[in-house]
Image (cartoon, helix red, strand yellow):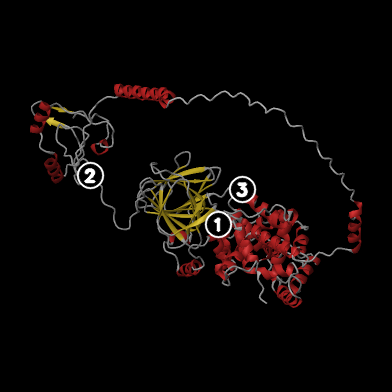
Amino acid sequence: MRLTLRTLLAWLDDTLEPSQVKEIGKQVSESPFAQELADRIHRVTRQRRLSVPSRSGPEGTDPNLVASYLDNNLDPEAVAEFERKCLTSDVNLAEVASVHQILSLLGQKVKVPPEVRARMSQLVKGREAISPRPKARPRKRPPEPVTEPLQPWVVPEAPPRPWLERFGPAVACIVLILLSSWSAWKSLSTASPRTAIPPEPAIAAGTGAGQQAPAGAGATATATATAPEAGKSETPVGKQPGQPAPETALALATPPAPSPPAESAATEKATPPAKSETADTAKAGKSSTTEPKSPAAGSVPRVASGSAALAEKPDGLLLRYNPREREWERLTEATPLERPDRLLCLAPFRASISLGKVHVTLVGETEVRILSLSSDSVPALELVQGRLRIRQPSANALKIVFADRAVTLKMSPEDHLAVERWTARPYGQPITRPAPLAIYCVQGDVSLTLDRPLDPLKAASVAVIDAAGQVKRSAPDTLPSWVTQVEPSSYELQVRDQFLHVFHPGRPVLTDIVVATEDERPEIKRLAVEALKALGDLSYLMPILKQGDAVARRAAIAAIRGYLGLGPEAVRRVRQQLDEEFGGKLGAQAEHMLIGYTPEEAANRDTYPRLVGLLSAEQDSAGIRELALDTLKRLTGRDDLGYDPDQPAGKGLDAWNELLRRNELRPLAPRAKTK
């Protein structure tokens, strides 16, 4: 008999045959995953805070689907999809387990003890205990009247009034109101004729500034004409000093005032037509306005009208957050972006977006939020986490917001720079501030503005700006590889293609990521765990940390430590999830081991008995044992001594206890700094 979620529920509720119970019990004893799932079913059915699944949302489920699943009326594909949803959602798992338990109780015959049956029989008496009801006496009929009763006097109903008398006054009032409104509107409106703009106007001397130069005539757009007879410069009608150029004047609502006929004729004689003047001026090279050059091949794509940014068609995995459904959606085509859209690029993919004329590449696990509007002169975005590369921008400014601070980068087309939120921190250092912002200048000079203009950032140098606004500059010997390496490596391409095949079109991204955490390939499993951390929902990481396999546990530990580097708010969320998964006391110890021990705590002798005690088999969580082993290795500089968190009892545990007994567990001496 195959071990599935339905057969496991039947085994737990004792609705199987004796032979099937023995077979399923053997399979459960041989499968750690089945044992963990059985414990999880017992736990979620006892949690009072879990409610009934809603009909919509990420955990929404149709009650008919639950009933069909329990009745074994679903297709195999629908059964697999529903069981996968139950494995990833405590609400749906509790719903299925509780309903199956209730149905199993209803199907059993209730056994009534004999004493209860006898007591119930004594409470009910026979027919002899029922007292007879008294017979009702027949009522006497009232004597019939001698004469017939008189009919009551009724006032006759008045005849209906005619239609004109009932609705005529109201209709007359409405007509008078409409006539008064129309006459008032006609008296207030002005009959000012509007001058129609011809489709292809030509700029002639003496005409108004509301005309537009023909396409391609980018030599001269001035509307000032010189009359030889007068010998003085004149300002054409409709164009005053300080007004916009003729190209912009077409967008104005007020038409230009017409010029006098005599003056127009004299001006036309004095000045040749605009087309010939444009051609002559272009030949002479005296044009004051240069026509914009057409964009070259490979330039930044143009953002759609009314959009703040444009996400180019990704060749990997690019997600956008849907606030209405509260889930991440995958982008497969070029998509316009508005404020405040959130984008998330998962590792090891890369994605490109265009903010106005600035081309930005999201490298690996990166989350940004669009902050600027289409009308803003300086595009702006918030770098929540991750890395950005900016190479040869077409615009000269970009505003980056982080930790309630904004830094403006002024660039030239020859500049090449990168930006990163630093989540790496020294082991054991308390997390009191959000992650700083690091700016790498690879080529050119970049001007920085942070509340005030700063000194330019030279090539091959780094500027780190913390949440307090302090700036630290350095010039390292080599910059990180992701900054200088434009194209991904062959290994990155290979892993990216393998990870991309995990995702299926039309399915939720979160479902595919949860399934990938159980993949047989270690690289895919680690990437899936990192993706769960990037999505921001830590509730999926805690079960992996608690009872996952060795690869998944270590990946979860690394992912949670990277998430802690984002700042105090991330620490608070991690502590909340640890308390829900492990309890208050054990959750505090897990948080301490994730952040690390300070040198003073490492020198304390009471630290090591607690850590070695967490290695014992009495600790039922393999994740806690893994964290304790990792902490001991970091503090003492030793290897694992043959200890396996999945098999705690053995020589490895005896070796750590022997070192503790001989008082040989001491902190690793710091290395001397070389000159």
- Residue corresponding to mark 3: 569
Q: CA distance from mark 2 to mark 1?
A: 48 Å
Depicted 289 relative to depicted 11: above or below: above
- Residue 44: name its quadrant: bottom right
Residue marked by disc 1: 534
How many numbered marks, from 0 up? 3
Query: Which of 457 and 626 lies nearest the eye of the viewer?
Result: 626
Quote the CA–CA distance across marks 1 and 3.
15 Å
Q: CA distance from mark 3 to mark 2?
A: 53 Å
Quadrant position of residue 389: bottom left
Q: Percent x, y for residue 667?
A: 71, 61
Whether residue 505 is visible, yes or no, is: yes
Task: Give, as a three-letter code, the residue at label 1.
Answer: Ala
Q: Which dot, 3 or 2, sits closer to the camera?
A: 3
Q: Position of residue 170 (x, y in %)?
A: 42, 24
Residue 592 visible to an observer of this rendering: no
Q: Amino acid at mark 3?
A: Glu
Task: Say which amino acid is labelled 2.
Answer: Thr
Q: Position of residue 80 (x, y in %)?
A: 59, 68
Which quadrant is the N terminus positioned in?
Answer: bottom right
Callout in the foreground (2, 1): 1
First reached walking from the N terminus: tag 3 or tag 2: 2
- Relative placement, left or right, of 246 versus 310 is left
Identify the residue under disc 2.
290
Q: Along the horizontal axis of the image, is 430 left or right of 159?
A: right
**Left or right, 309 with reference to 139:** left
* Earlier-in-chain disc, 1 versus 3: 1
SS assignment at label 1: helix
